[in-house]
Amino acid sequence: MRPVRGWPTILNLGGTITERYDETRLTGRLSAADLVMLAGQDIGAVDIALKDSSDLSFDEILAAREAIRRDQDSRGFVLCCGTDALEEAAYAAALLLPRERPWVVTAASHPSTSPRADGARHLRQALAVLASLGRDGTPVLVFGGLLFDIARVSKLDPGVDQPFGPISAQVGAIAPEGVRFFRPPMPIPIYRDAGPDVSRARVAVVSHTFGALAHLPAPADVDGLVVAGCGPGGMSAALRDVLRTRWIGRVPVVVSSRCAAGFVRDGFDPKYAMLDLIQEGFIVDGYEGLNASKARLKLILDLSAGAGKRM
């Protein structure tokens, strides 16, 4: 289906919301036109990719960006993708997609053939939220009647109907009287000029607490490193020493957190001596509020944009 002037448009990236199963296996996927039927509303539809979210890459997000740029008629967009890697796909989209018109992300916990299928409900909720948004705003994830901050949301439990959190990532809800925001989502920068070579940057994620330090790549093998620290950026003395003596000054090393919503510095609490880390050459600014996976995506784009080239 083509976009229709004045209507919102679905951009279909696949995932559970599109899956069809028989008794034993996946038998096919719903197209964007099928999702329109599922939503039961007059909207446009474009297929970007029909695949599992864990197989998505920057290529599909850039394809969605081109679809938006070509479409001069739709008043907004709903991105549909899978939940397994939704937090990464949605954050990559927020970094790359234009915001001159509003867009939101939604998904489903259960496939379209399940008795518990929730895709149609989430599509209708996403369209209701889209209609309430102004132009040029930060996009949100719509799921289970809740609105989530894309920068801070994570999938916390793969075995429940509403797997997303934490509570601090909730920014609104769909109430009987309409869409209600509790707080604004965290601002997300836009990399408007990122091109097809964005995925060339090699960025690894490491974490270390108990036991021997192992599986750390060589600085020459990567273009950047993200530390999935404990809580607000803590790391073992062994890892910190190795990074300080062998990595800092050679490649960018970002301090993040293995916590679901990353961390935000507390100006009244010097815990983990964050100022010491910054003075030693670790990177914190610009990455607060991001877990390690999202910090990795942003560092890839920063490297692509020339903001963090090999030192």
Image (tube, rainbow, N blue to C red):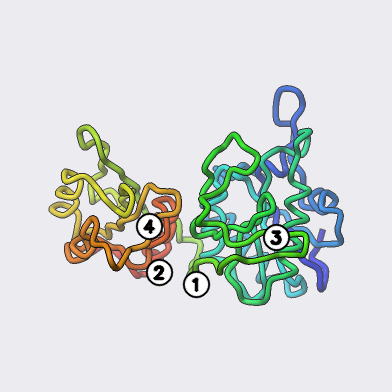
Closer to the camera: disc 3 or disc 4?
Answer: 4
As drawn, is 149 to the left or to the right of 198? Answer: right
The residue at which mark 4 appears reads as 263
Q: Earlier in the sequence, mark 3 or mark 4?
A: 3
The residue at which mark 2 appears reads as 305
Classify mark 4: helix, strand or loop: loop
| Relative height, residue 46 to residue 115 (above, below) | below
Q: Earlier in the sequence, mark 2 or mark 1?
A: 1
Q: Position of residue 154 (x, y in %)?
A: 51, 49
Residue 39 is labelled as none
Task: Indicate the amino acid at tag 3.
Answer: Val
Closer to the camera: disc 1 or disc 4?
Answer: 4
Task: Indicate the amino acid at tag 2.
Answer: Ala
Q: Does residue 49 appear in the picture of this structure?
A: no
Classify mark 2: helix, strand or loop: helix
Q: CA distance from mark 1 to mark 3?
A: 22 Å
Within 10 angstroms of label 2, few (less than 14), some, or many (20 or more) residues?
some
As drawn, is 176 to the left or to the right of 161? Answer: right
What residue is drawn where x is 51% and y is 50%?
Answer: 166
Q: Earlier in the sequence, mark 1 or mark 4?
A: 1
As drawn, is 6 to the left or to the right of 300? Answer: right
Classify mark 3: helix, strand or loop: strand
What residue is drawn where x is 67% and y is 57%?
Answer: 79
Closer to the camera, 117 or 244? Answer: 117
Tell me whether circle 3 and circle 4 mark residues in contact (CB < 8 Å).
no
Closer to the camera, 192 or 214? Answer: 214
The residue at which mark 1 appears reads as 193
Tell me whether circle 2 and circle 1 mark residues in contact (CB < 8 Å).
yes
The residue at which mark 3 appears reads as 78
Closer to the camera: disc 2 or disc 4?
Answer: 4
What residue is drawn where x is 80% and y is 62%?
Answer: 44
Within 10 angstroms of label 3, few (less than 14), some, or many (20 or more) residues?
many
